[in-house]
């Protein structure tokens, strides 16, 4: 018999567990050096004082080596015999990068191979398993769901905020109209009557396939038609769009909300049950990696963390700023430098010594750059190849990234000029609905600020890295400079933005008459690229002066209360959820829009035990916030009249709200930017309403406010009315106005006649890219068309009026001055039709 005990080394059971000591024993590649001071501190503090915490957040600057820290922590846990351990990345691309890092440092790891089996080296706790988040978080996960799951001793979530999005997607069904048309049309048909009640115009846009038009299914319709909905989904449950989420939501469809757009249906629960993924939620240790620019408030609701964990991250106490960002805002140097001018200049450049990268929010903007000569890698594989080429210093074209604000690193020469073009948007319909209903939502603004910061950080990946970052697009510029939204950025980013504004003022002072518009922008970029000592000293001195503060403006306790209320609803404790929500509203909410938002949630909970009470709550919600769902029992329309109004007085009141002319001009410029063809229809209609208010008229959005009538209605002196039907999202290649669109216009003109009578003076306008009326269509009223040129002329005249006000004190400007400039720029109601519209052409064959 073999005595194995004689073969066992005395030290075999006493592996080194201190992560700093582990690092010294690794068979590392020669290119690796010693641990940085920040890495040593984090690892030592964790090992000595915090390694037993169940939930831990590690916060460090980008480029400080969080990946190595996470790998060493997991190796330490393995050596303590407390594995198995998993390192989770948000996508395949980053999982590959982490595997390369582990190999470089000599840290044993394993991956899931093509056969899709979990390796034995993971089960035995010998090696760290490196995976991307979709492997763990999906309804058919090989790690199991519900009560049956693989156990883990520790999990590291790298780029944890991006992983939250993956978890949310795991519970979400997205049905594309083009690839799963049968399912799409069956669901659309099921809810057609309900959607028509909410808004005929929006429904017609959806029926016509308009990309950005979307509506929420009323929760009462969703609850009442649950069985029919389940039958439709079960027919298609083996399709890729449905099967991965089906197992997670099929028995809990009541807690989901559904949104329908012209191209897609999205079904997702309002509360993400992360406990369904036991491998993660029941892990003995969860270590979440977070950048200093990210607000960890989202871990409370997204990952189920307690506020205490979020409030006690593990940070490096001597941490200051990292990396050099020259943020350039060209429109703050000269407001004639718009995003199209920037695009025209930079899209065609063929860089030789460094990369030029543009991040845009959507496909339309990506194609704009592509048509100008930039390289837009649309497929994921092509994108990965393109990024790898940049890192190999292969520079051929300006590269365009479509809605890629995170997950892509562009260090050093791979990107020295980064352009953030236009405001990013939130991907999920639930977020879009919240943004639409509650535009001042702190949560939404935090998400947008975080997305912008992620974009700003793509090209500065270390302490010595540097990049010139051009920020363009009126809405984006307004967000980063406005006091109302600037506060949502981290203190480091706020300071970098302040430097950008200071640089813009300096550039103004240096301007010469003979300079072209882009001369100061090019000059500043050259100073950065040539490593101008003055710039470097100025930047360092400016950044050294700022202090990292706690700008989280946290609502951790408030978020936790919301999450607990949703949990009651998920557990089918509907009455308790409604009672808790009422107390939450009483204790926490003051703003009317926000109050309406939470009253709608309360009405949703209440519907499942008292329909009558729910209807009353929804009516109250709608009175507070007209962007919400229209109540079942309808809404009474309030006619508008100008009898007791004074136009000039209204204009004075409007402009008097602004602190100074610069703030006023920036706001109005952003507003007019939304008044463009191709812009989201809701934004366009909101902008048109506010332009009416700016011009001193009474301005309404009947279709939005009562779900009947035209998109916009202005009422002016002598009770003259302008009625607008907005089709600004219609393709510019559209040949004609369709019969459906003409019928919609006729319905809204008829609505006006019923409400106001036929003897009232009213002009009817359709804002659309074509003036040709289809042969089979007819208008029942005199309708004028506003096309691109007419809209541009209106905007130009509005800009001219705004510029005239520059020399005046907005608080004391006289009525005579305002009226003079209104006349000069043809902004009176009586001349509106002849100045900005044209007759339609009716095809006769």
Image (cartoon, rainbow, N blue to C red):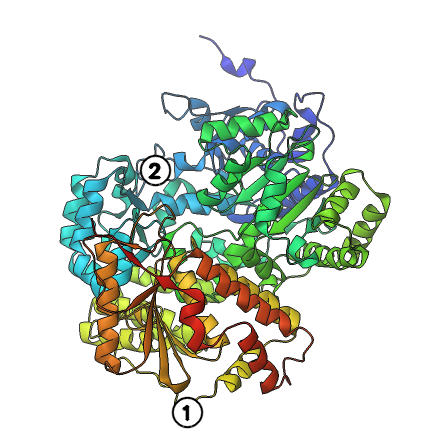
Q: How many marks?
A: 2
In the image, residue 418 above or below residue 784: above
Task: Residue 678: give x, y in percent of width and height.
Answer: 42, 52
Q: Secondary structure at mark 2?
A: loop
For the residue carrying disc 2, how many other residues have a C-alpha within 10 Å: few (<14), some (14-19), or many (20+)?
Answer: some
Please state if 237 lies on the left or on the right of 729 as rendered: left
Residue in the foreground of this view, choosing between 572 and 552: 552
Extreme residue in the top direction: 1
For the residue carrying disc 1, how many other residues have a C-alpha within 10 Å: few (<14), some (14-19), or many (20+)?
Answer: few
Residue in the foreground of this view, choosing between 405 and 167: 405
Residue in the foreground of this view, choosing between 125 and 545: 545
Quarter-of-image position of residue 575:
bottom left
In the image, residue 410 above or below residue 175: above
Task: Give the Cα separation between the discs numbered 1 and 2.
Answer: 69 Å
In the image, residue 224 above or below residue 647: above
Circles 1 and 2, Cβ within 8 Å, touching? The answer is: no
Q: Residue at x 16, y 54 (%)?
A: 190
Q: Secondary structure at mark 1?
A: loop
Task: Residue 633: give x, y in percent of width and height.
Answer: 20, 75
Task: Residue 186: give x, y in percent of width and height.
Answer: 17, 47
Please state if 478 lies on the left or on the right of 773 as rendered: right
What numbered label is drawn on residue 149? 2
The answer to whether residue 218 is visible is no
Q: Residue at x 38, y 59 (%)?
A: 681
For marks 1 and 2, the one nearer the N-term is 2
In the image, residue 402 above or below residue 505: above
Q: Which residue is mark 1?
A: 644
Residue in the foreground of this view, choosing between 633 and 364: 364
Q: Residue at x 71, y 23 (%)?
A: 31
Foreground mark, 1 or 2, reads: 1
């Amino acid at each position: 018999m073999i005595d194995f005990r004689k073969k066992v080394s005395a030290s075999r059971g006493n592996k080194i567990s201190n992560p700093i000591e582990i690092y010294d024993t690794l068979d590392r590649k020669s290119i690796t050096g010693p641990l940085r001071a920040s890495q040593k501190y984090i690892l030592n503090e964790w090992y000595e004082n915090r390694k037993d915490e169940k939930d831990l957040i590690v916060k460090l600057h980008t480029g400080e080596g969080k990946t190595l820290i996470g790998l060493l922590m997991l190796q330490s846990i393995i050596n303590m015999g407390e594995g198995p351990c998993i390192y989770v990345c948000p996508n395949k691309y980053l999982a590959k990068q982490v595997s390369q890092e582990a190999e470089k440092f000599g840290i044993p790891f394993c991956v899931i191979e093509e056969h899709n089996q979990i390796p034995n080296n993971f089960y035995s706790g010998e090696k760290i398993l490196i995976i991307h988040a979709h492997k763990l978080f999906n309804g058919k996960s090989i790690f199991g769901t519900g009560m049956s799951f693989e156990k883990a001793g520790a999990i590291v979530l790298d780029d944890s905020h991006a992983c939250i999005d993956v978890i949310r997607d795991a519970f979400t069904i997205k049905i594309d109209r083009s690839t799963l048309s049968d399912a799409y049309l069956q669901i659309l048909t099921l809810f057609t009557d309900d959607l028509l009640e909410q808004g005929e115009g929006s429904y017609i846009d959806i029926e016509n396939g308009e990309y950005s038009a979307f509506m929420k299914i009323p929760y009462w319709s969703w609850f009442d038609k649950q069985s029919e909905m389940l039958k439709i989904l079960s027919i298609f449950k083996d399709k890729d769009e449905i099967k991965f989420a089906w197992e997670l939501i099929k028995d809990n469809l009541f807690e989901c909300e559904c949104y329908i757009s012209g191209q897609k249906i999205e079904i997702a629960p309002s509360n993400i049950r992360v406990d369904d993924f036991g491998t993660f939620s029941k892990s003995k240790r969860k270590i979440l990696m977070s950048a200093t620019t990210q607000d960890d408030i989202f871990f409370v609701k997204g990952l189920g963390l307690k506020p205490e964990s979020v409030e006690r991250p593990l940070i490096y106490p001597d941490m200051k700023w990292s990396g050099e960002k020259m943020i350039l805002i060209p429109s703050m140097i000269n407001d004639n430098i718009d995003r199209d001018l920037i695009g025209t200049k930079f899209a065609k450049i063929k860089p030789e010594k460094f990369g030029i990268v543009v991040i845009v929010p959507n496909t339309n903007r990506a194609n704009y750059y592509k048509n100008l000569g930039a390289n837009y890698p649309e497929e994921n594989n092509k994108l990965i190849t393109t990024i790898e080429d940049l890192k190999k210093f292969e520079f051929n074209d300006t590269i365009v990234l479509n809605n890629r604000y995170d997950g892509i690193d562009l260090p050093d020469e791979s990107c020295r000029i980064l352009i953030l073009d236009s405001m990013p948007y939130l991907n999920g319909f639930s977020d879009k609905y919240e943004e639409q209903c509650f535009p001042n939502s702190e949560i939404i603004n935090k998400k947008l600020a975080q997305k912008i910061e992620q974009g700003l950080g793509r090209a500065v990946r270390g302490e010595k890295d540097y990049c010139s970052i051009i920020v363009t697009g009126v809405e984006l510029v307004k967000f980063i400079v406005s006091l109302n939204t600037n506060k949502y950025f981290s203190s480091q980013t706020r300071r970098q933005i302040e430097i950008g504004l200071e640089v813009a003022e300096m550039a103004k002072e240096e301007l010469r008459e003979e300079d072209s518009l882009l001369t100061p922008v090019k000059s500043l970029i050259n100073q950065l690229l040539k490593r101008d000592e003055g710039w470097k000293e100025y930047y360092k001195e400016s950044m050294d002066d700022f202090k990292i503060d706690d700008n989280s403006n946290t609502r951790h306790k408030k978020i936790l209360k919301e999450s607990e209320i949703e949990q009651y609803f998920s557990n089918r404790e509907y009455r308790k959820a409604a009672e808790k929500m009422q107390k939450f509203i009483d204790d926490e909410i003051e703003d009317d829009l926000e109050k309406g938002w939470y009253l709608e949630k309360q009405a949703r909970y209440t519907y499942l035990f008292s329909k009558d009470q729910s209807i009353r709550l929804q009516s109250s919600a709608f009175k507070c916030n007209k962007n919400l769902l229209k109540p079942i029992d309808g809404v009474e329309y309030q006619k508008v009249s100008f009898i007791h109004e004074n136009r000039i007085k209204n204009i004075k009141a409007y402009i008097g709200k602004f602190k100074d002319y610069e703030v006023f001009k920036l706001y109005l410029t952003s507003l007019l930017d939304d008044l463009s063809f191709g812009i989201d229809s809701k934004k366009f209609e909101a902008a048109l309403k506010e332009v009416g208010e700016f011009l001193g008229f009474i301005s309404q959005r009947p279709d939005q406010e009562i779900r009947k009538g035209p998109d916009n209605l202005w009422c002016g002196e002598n009770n003259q009315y302008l009625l607008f039907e907005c089709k600004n999202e219609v393709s510019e290649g559209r040949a004609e106005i369709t019969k459906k669109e003409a019928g919609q216009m006729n319905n809204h003109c008829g609505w006006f006649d019923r409400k106001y009578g036929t003897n009232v003076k009213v002009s009817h306008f359709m804002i659309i890219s074509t003036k040709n009326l289809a042969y089979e269509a007819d208008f029942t009223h005199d309708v004028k068309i506003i096309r691109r040129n007419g809209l541009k002329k209106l905007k130009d005249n509005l800009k001219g009026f705004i510029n005239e006000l520059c020399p005046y004190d907005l608080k004391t400007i006289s009525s005579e001055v305002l009226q003079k400039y209104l006349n000069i720029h043809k902004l009176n109601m009586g001349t509106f039709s002849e100045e900005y519209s044209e007759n339609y052409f009716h095809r006769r064959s």
